[in-house]
Image: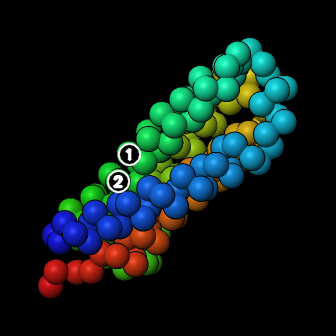
Amino acid sequence: MNWYQVGEAAILASVLSSFTDWYFFGIMFHDRYHSTPGVWRQYKDKKDEIKSVTIGTLYGSVTSIVFVISCAYWDIYGYLPALITAGILWIMIPMPLLLSNAQFMKIDRRLVISHGLGWLARLVVSALSVGLCLKSAS
């Protein structure tokens, strides 16, 4: 495992996925967050909202970093194997959670769609970073 390549891929994936998060979790259907005000935190101060967004971005980076490290550990190299892994993980983890939450919580269905697409985008960007940066040691 070349730690330089892993670090490069992890940083690239984290930075790029922050942009996908910004779009899918923040911009797409932004007005729909106001349709269920009891679900979402209301901020009195913009500084508190920025703090929450920053912490959320750091949490999202964990997904990208762990994805890259896992691919390196399990010898998943190249675009296609990494994209297949991303797709499997997307179907296996965030989608069942989002769909289950949508059954019990008052969340606008368009937000469920945008969050599902956001998770897919985050994993695809991470997979593309693996394909670009990680090279097989053999």
Q: Position of residue 19 (x, y in %)?
A: 59, 56
Classify 45 as above or below 31. above
Asked which quadrant contains residue 14, the reply is bottom left
Classify 107 as above or below 118. above
Q: Position of residue 12 (x, y in %)?
A: 42, 65
Q: Which residue in the rendered view is the most extreme toward the bottom?
A: 138
Q: Looking at the image, which residue is at 54% across and 52% down? A: 18
Q: Position of residue 7 (x, y in %)?
A: 28, 63
- The three-letter code of the residue at mark 1 reads Val
Residue of label 2: 65
Do we see residue 108 in this rendering?
yes
Q: Secondary structure at mark 2?
A: helix
Q: Position of residue 39 (x, y in %)?
A: 70, 19
Q: Looking at the image, which residue is at 46% across and 72% down? A: 128
User: Would you say 127 lies left or right of 3 here?
Assistant: right
Residues at marks 2 and 1 touching, judged by CB atoms closer than 8 Å: yes
Asked which quadrant contains residue 1, the reply is bottom left
- Disc assigned to residue 21: none
Rate crowding at label 1 as few (under 14), some (14 to 19) or many (20 or more) other CA atoms within 10 Å: few
- The three-letter code of the residue at mark 2 reads Ile
Do we see residue 87 in this rendering?
no
Classify 14 as above or below 62. below
Residue of label 1: 62
User: Would you say 76 lies left or right of 122 here?
Assistant: left
